[in-house]
Amino acid sequence: MTDSVTKKQGNKINLQVKVMILFLTISLLPLSIVGFFSITTTENLIVEMVMRQLENVAVDKASILERWVSERKADMLVTTGSPTLKTMVPEKIGPYLDLIQKKYEVYKKHTLISSAENFAVTFQDGTLQYRDKSQTRYELIAQLFLSNIVLSDEEKESTFDIAAPILHENGDIAGTLYGTVGTRQIIFFILNVALGRTGECYLVDGKGTFLAHKEPKRILKETISLQNIIGSRNPKKSYQDYRGIEVFGTSRPINGTDWHVVVEQDCDEVFESVSKLKRSLYLMILLCIGSALMLTWVISYHIIRPIRTLNRSVDLLANAEFEKGIIRINRRDEIGALYQAFENMARKLQARQNHLEQKVDLKDAELKETDIVLNQIKRIAERSEKFAAIG
């Protein structure tokens, strides 16, 4: 009964498990705390740095685009103020506008609307095209005007028009010149950013519709949720972009338009260094677990195994199996001293047991002799009674 209880308690309270749990707690708890704060701090620093970089890029791109649009407006005002344009003669105006298109490389075409004529003249690639004004979307405008961005006929890039009035000397409107500007230059020279592998910059309107993008198929056909970017969200929180990928991003409006410059970068690339830090931390945790298992085995071999052997010897001594219970060990440490003390105790118990057995045997012999004497006395008494009865 005692042996079974001892074995059950031994199964419940295992020194090996205790040592392993203790070592894992001592080694992993500080490492986990330090690792957690390191990863959290690193993530916060990286997010703060990335957001600052994205905001700086957005501010720079918005400023550049505003200046670029202002320059195009100034171009149109200078062009419409030239004496050549004031003649309103298409044959004279054509070479002048062709020179402007080749010099600036941003105007895809120019369209002239005359207040005196019922036709519109399109200047493109050195050629003139006459069309009825009613068949075009252009009309006379008395002030500088910036149109919405539309998709070009070729559907390879989006365009917008800048209109400037042509005035007579007396201030009357002689006509309006429309300059059609392609957004390819905006994409290549303004929206092109160097933000790692996944950073990108594109242009949307107030509704989130793509106006200028590196993928022409998305222009004016797909819409993003600007609330993810310019809404009342935490600017340091990621969101899903138009591809369904978690990104960090920011935006800036373009003054004088309903355009917004959006700058984004994928979260995977942002947290790439954090992922490496996590992998290093996980590797260290695995090494600690392996070290704990190795330490447990060493402790089991050098400490726990002798204790278990000693426990079995105690059970043998309890059953009076002294020869089997006496164990010897050549270790000179505390375990060896414990074994030596246990051996001395076992030998003393064996000697005492032998002494007690001898005393018991002696008492048994004395009792047997006493029994013989009593039997003899009893027989003598019986004989005496018989003789007394006879006579």
Image (cartoon, helix red, strand yellow):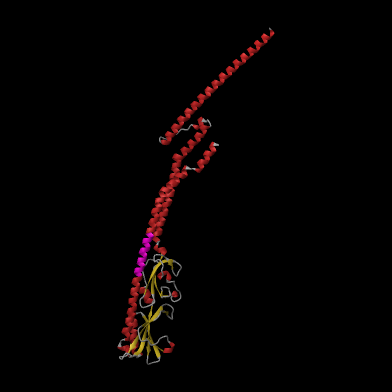
Residue at the top extreme? 391
349 w.r.t. 291: above or below: above
Q: In the picture, which quadrant includes the N terminus?
A: top right
User: Whole-percent x and y of residue 246?
Assistant: 43, 65
32 w.r.t. 352: above or below: below
User: Whole-percent x and y of residue 63?
Assistant: 33, 74
Residue at the bottom extreme? 116
121 w.r.t. 189: above or below: below
Residue 346 shows in this picture: yes
Magenta portion: prevailing SS class: helix
Q: In the picture, which quadrant includes the C terminus?
A: top right
Q: Nearer the viewer, residue 360 or 203?
A: 360
- All told, the count of numbered labels is 0
User: Whole-percent x and y of residue 223?
Assistant: 45, 73
Magenta-span inclusion, residue 176: no
Residue 194 shows in this picture: no
Q: Residue at x 45, y 33 (%)?
A: 339
User: Whole-percent x and y of residue 341?
Assistant: 44, 32
Magenta-span inclusion, residue 53: yes
The picture quadrant where one finds residue 133 is bottom left
Q: Which residues are magenta?
A: 42-57
The picture quadrant where one finds residue 184 is bottom left
Q: Nearer the viewer, residue 8 or 281?
A: 8
74 w.r.t. 266: above or below: below
Viewed as shown, does residue 132 lie left or right of 361? left
Q: Residue at x 32, y 81 (%)?
A: 74
